[in-house]
Amino acid sequence: MFRRTLRRILIAALWALALAPSPLRAQQPPTPGYALKANVRRVVVDVVATDVSGRPVRGLSAKDFAVEEDGQPQHILSFDAHDDKDAWTGTLPANIPPNTFINLPRQAEQGPLYVLLYDMLNSSDSNPVFADHATQIFARQQLITFIQSKPEGTRFAIMAISDGLHLIQGFTNERPRLFAALDPDGKTPHMPKVFLYPELYWPGDGGYYLGVMKDIVGYLDGFPGRKNLIWVSASFPFAVFSDNGPPDLVAEVRKELTAMAAAHIAVYPIDASGCCKIGEQNLMEDEVADETGGHAFYNSNDLVDSLAKAVDDGAVYYTLSYASTNKNYDGKLRHIEIKLARQGYRLAYRRQYYADPEAPVAPALDISTRKPTKAPATAPPPDTLYAYIRHGAPMSHDLLFSAHVQADGPPKLAMPEQMADLADEPAFFRKRRKERKNKPAAPPTPVPLQTYTIEYGIPSRQFRLQDATRDEEQDSVEFAAAAYDADGYQLNGNLGHATSSTREAGKYYRALQQFEVPTTAAWICLAVRDMATGRIGNVEFSLPLALEPAGGSASR
């Protein structure tokens, strides 16, 4: 009850901050810093329990479970039950001023994260090189039908495999945005029609899919909780997942499946080819699902029903952790077995992990375009910032904030030092010319930059109501901004932090950030992190900005 009351107070404070004009405070100079990632020597396992009818089982407790590792009993250290009925109920008000962004959803969110992975490359048994058009069209139509009736509040991202792994739509619970991403006739960014036809790129070996799996793990690993990967394909790559494939490749794939499970990614293979395929293909799909805690669906012409069952299966789960009694971290494979005191239920969970030695803690990737001149004033908590500043990341509400964004004048050509910073970003790196023999690379051609001023407002009550271990005199907050082009490549980034006195903060912390963005940018992501606790909030919006009333932005 206290959490719900506090949430309502904070949301009301944000509404007031966004709607009431206020003068800008002096800018806090950004000081770039590093974020560290720490490893905890606990084994965390998500468990899905279903009855004989395949329905999720609710109401279980820690005493119902028993855990063994390599046959040795383990003590359960923590236990949490996750229900699809659990929802974030705070929503965005309808009368927010133009270009003011708050990390609140438009409608209530519920359940874990889902990824619809549409495999447009491996989609025909008879012809493994080119996609079967009828299957492609059928699968797309079924996906659209499912999206139009998906459970309210569930958050999906849409990815496609073709000439690479493409993020078609980032995480959202809004059906219209998901529908537009799949609609081939839509006017907004969507899955290109070219992926449907024989111009598809065929990599020629199963190692291509190993790279796809690594990319998926890299993208999803930073988000907490269970992620359900619904992999829709007409023919899963046998050479990749079968024990009959190349030994080295099979070993790498097994390791990557284990990494998926460790990142709380459960795979739900769904066969889009319909009835009735039997044999090794089905066994392979079952094995992929079993190793990651998911469930395979095949031999059905009703793809919509399979998708709905996959969502239902992954919505209710339990998370438990234990510290292994075997303290010899020698990199070997260890096997997990979980038993339930009650009979007649099916359990799905990760079956194994590699007991790798604890790696030294290394600095996380720095989204800033400038090298840090000094470390932050306080030691930062485990890194959550980089995950949530990426294009398409799910919205986090652990730290609520508002941000008003305005363009400062017309675009201007970048100075040489600005181009030097931009040249280190992925989108510019792809276009950089190769160095000629005995000659330095030509400097990149200057591009127009648009400068934006971002005014942040954070209800200070969120800090004062934290536990007594934090510094009562001051709070350090990180502010991050990243710009992306239409293909999702990062164009530029800015990372800084400010320290504010709790006694002088009043109702809100305010900070200003200037961000120079190439005019080719299509998206800007913002994130704010409390450095003492690691709590984070983030929001993403598209460009160009909306028109504002004359003089309106200056009086905020």
Image (spheres, helix red, strand yellow):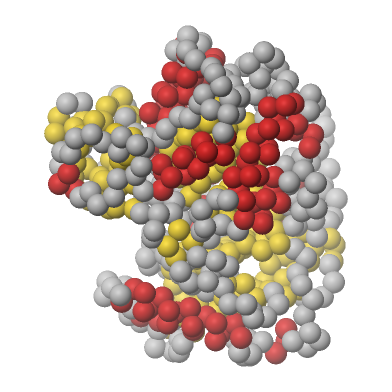
Image quadrant in which you'd find residue 54: top left
The number of numbered badges drawn on the structure is 0
Q: In this view, does 390 lie to the left or right of 399?
A: right
Quarter holding the C terminus? bottom right
- Compared with 88, 117 (above or below) is above
Looking at the picture, tell me which residue is in the foreground, 436 or 213: 213
Q: Is residue 556 left or right of residue 401?
A: right
Looking at the picture, tell me which residue is in the foreground, 519 or 176: 176
- Residue shown at 19% from the left, 35% from the top: 343
- Compared with 196, 105 (above or below) is below
- Residue shown at 50% from the left, 65% from the top: 108
* x and y percentages locating residue 72 in the rendered image: 14, 29
* x and y percentages locating residue 397 in the rendered image: 47, 66
- Residue shown at 58% from the left, 51% from the top: 149
Looking at the picture, tell me which residue is in the foreground, 405 or 100: 100
* x and y percentages locating residue 184 in the rendered image: 77, 43
One can see residue 472 in this view: yes
Q: In this view, does 140 lie to the left or right of 466?
A: right
Image quadrant in which you'd find residue 165: top right
- Residue shown at 30% from the left, 75% from the top: 1
Q: In this view, does 556 lie to the left or right of 188?
A: left
One can see residue 329 in this view: no
* x and y percentages locating residue 167 in the rendered image: 64, 44
- Compared with 399, 168 (above or below) is above
Looking at the picture, tell me which residue is in the foreground, 1 or 531: 1
